[in-house]
Image (cartoon, rainbow, N blue to C red):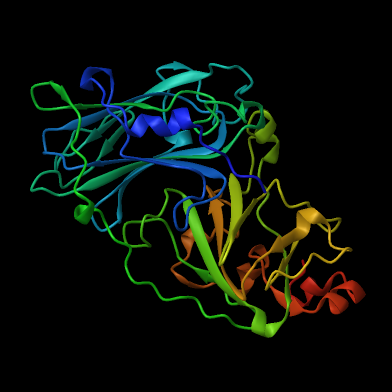
Amino acid sequence: MKCLLFTLATLACTALAQDPSRGCPWSVVRATGESIGGDQHAAYYGLRLVPTPDDRLEVDAAFPHARYFSWTVYNHDGKLVASMNDRQIRPVRGKNPFHPGVPRHKTDIGRYRLTFQFKQAAAEGVNTLHVPGGGGGRQFMVYYRVFDVDGLYRPGPLAASGGVPAPMLRMYDAAGKSHCPDPPAPDEQPRPPAQRQPPALNPPFWWNTGSTTAETSWYSNEGVVYVASYFSSRYGPLCVLRWRPPQTPVEAFEGRPFPLGEEARFWSLDFSGENRIGVADRDVPRLADGSRQLVVGFNGIEKPSFVPANQWVGMKGKEASVLFRIMLAAENYRHNLAKLPAGPVPPEHVAIVPGGVYCTPEQLKENPNIGLRRGDSN
């Protein structure tokens, strides 16, 4: 349940004026979970720009030591317009450690380069992202996300960026001259749209936001499904979550290669209210029956002595919103929610989301498996 921490040296990169030929500074560098809705196991780097159709953005980077990373481009409304995940990237040197079986223990595994083109009709190419709509003063945001940095590379001065320097950015105009984009004025920055708060029901109601296309939620991430719910203490002082999430390669956190078969790459849960708590797949123990369990307490209630520390989520307030992320679910995974339209999680898939049964500490002590009351325990 630990978050990555940015060092002062990492944060300072946003303030340094740089020679464009040596790279442009990031507009946004956020510590894990620092932004609203941000995953507390991730680091976020963003570049705001207003490109012309002839501009191109070049990225030169080392593959990070992490569980997952992605590049995404959003328009002024925060809608996804271009994206690439780690396994889609071809290295220019070394190997891509996010491919199955590739050793990941070496300090320098490989490097890659990406090109972002902003023309309406751009030539296809390896490691090229076509971002239509450049020009006319339209703003875009390029985001680089790094999730769950390997344990060997944190803490440390490069922990946030996965044990390697943050990617180098260079902008070029039609004549090939390098320049850095001017940051937009504060009132030009995108604002989140008004969103309906999921209802706090008993049992909790889980809403699948759907696939990660341009038509879905604000600032969605490539290859990631977001499932949301809302909890309230008016139904009980505790809410017991019991579910069977997709199997993920948690061994990669220790530097081991990614396996050939996996149901999904990574999953995490973020609880937000008066305080914020984030947990990920490797934080929550797998029980003897293959399920996972978390006990959410409200109003600052003390953890019952019989509840293991790695199964406890203590919220200070009366209510909490919850976001369940599933990253890169396998195409053949039968519970791949990315293939479903936005809406309530269907009954045939509900066992993979964290459910929820409200109770008292006494009821939980009497029945440690009370979370299985949700119906589907298989």
Q: Quadrant of the C terminus?
A: bottom right
In the drawing, does residue 164 fall left or right of residue 365?
left
Above or below residue 207? Residue 47 is above
Q: What is the count of numbered marks?
A: 0
Task: Report if residue 333 is visible in the image.
Answer: no
In the drawing, does residue 266 fall left or right of residue 282?
left
Q: Residue furthest right?
A: 366
Q: Residue at x 10, y 48 (%)?
A: 137
Q: Residue at x 60, y 17 (%)?
A: 106
Quadrant of the rendered structure where residue 258 is? Answer: top right
Front residue (pair 240, 97): 240
Q: Residue at x 42, y 28 (%)?
A: 166
Above or below residue 236? Residue 157 is above
Quadrant of the rendered structure where residue 141 is? Answer: top left
Task: Report if residue 276 is visible in the image.
Answer: yes
Above or below residue 173? Residue 366 is below
- Give percent across and percent down for residue 327: 53, 49
- Give percent across and percent down for residue 321: 55, 69
- Give percent across and percent down for residue 151: 66, 32
- Give percent across and percent down for residue 62: 45, 22
Q: Residue at x 60, y 53 (%)?
A: 268
